[in-house]
Amino acid sequence: MMDRGKIKAVFRNEWQQTFTAGGMTGWLLLCLFPVLLTTLVSRVGRIDPEATEAWTMILFPVCEIICLLQLLLWATPWLSSELEAGNWIYLSVRPGGKTAVLLGKYLAAATRTMIGTTIGLLLALLVAKPEDGVYLFLVLGTLIAISSFSYAAVFTFLGTLFPRRAMVMAVGYSLLIELAVSFIPAVINQVSIQFRLRSMLFTWMDFLQVQGSWRPPPGFEDMLGNSSVLLHLGVLLCMNVGLLWIGSQLICRREQVSKVEV
């Protein structure tokens, strides 16, 4: 049985590292990016404040990019950082130590990403001042939370599977699956997280504005999707649990080399 105290200890330690000078600088720069972009668009693009759809199409991809960038830095190298620091031997002899580090770092990376991106979204909306800013914040904030935990599970798994090349694999996954495959108008795009986030975005925004059932334009059904939100949430939840479980089994059963053999 997993010791929750060990997971909390890892989680707390990871958050403490956030409040160092270097950690806070990088975190704030990423959080302020949506604000800077919104300010630039507001002054140069001169978007109508009442154009909620326009701000949605701008802020949604920006927030997703910020989520990915933060998780690339915090979730992907979770195992390689322990190997380089020489802590893996100590963790290996502690009961449940490996899994506790995996879950603790996963939760820390996901919550840190969620909070930072949500703060950036809030500040960006205060600058943009769209007409329906409150529910736009609720919708995008919910999607930020979902994407933070979902991408954190994927990147943590990739960091477990390829500890020495985790960053390369995570970037490749982001470009190939989340950017390219997710926009292919075929069933294959359903393997991407972005497809499900995009489907939930269109569903919720249409429901909040016109109280109707959103249907994608003819010819765009496979690209945008019109499945129920519960289905998307269920698939993402199963994916997260499955990837974390497989990752925990891998680190518990596979030997790790702390230093590269010369």
Image (cartoon, helix red, strand yellow):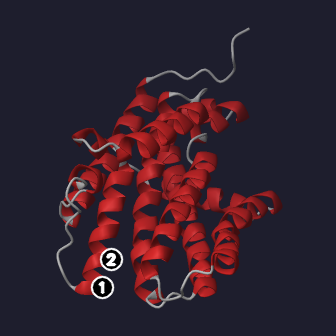
Observer-nearest of 43 and 79: 43
The picture places residue 5, in percent across and down from the top left corner, at: 49, 58
| 112 lies left or right of 40 | left
| Quarter containing the C terminus | top right
**Residue 260, x across and y down, in percent:** 69, 17
**What residue type is disc 1 on?**
Gln
Do the residues under discs 2 and 1 have CB atoms within 8 angstroms? yes
How many labels were placed on the picture?
A: 2
Question: Residue 154: image x %, image y %?
Answer: 43, 43
At x 52%, y 27%, the residue is: 162
- Location of residue 90 in the rendering, given as x and y in whole percent from the top left corner: 62, 34
**Which disc number belongs to residue 209?**
1
**Residue at position x 74%, y 59% from top?**
26
- Which quadrant of the structure image shows residue 171? top right
Please name the residue that numbered disc 2 is placed on: 205
Residue type at mark 2 is: Met
Task: Name which quarter of the figure residue 15 lies in.
Answer: bottom right
Does 13 appear above or below 81?
below
Residue lying farthest bottom? 131
In the shown orientation, is residue 44 left or right of residue 236?
right
Q: Residue furthest top?
A: 262
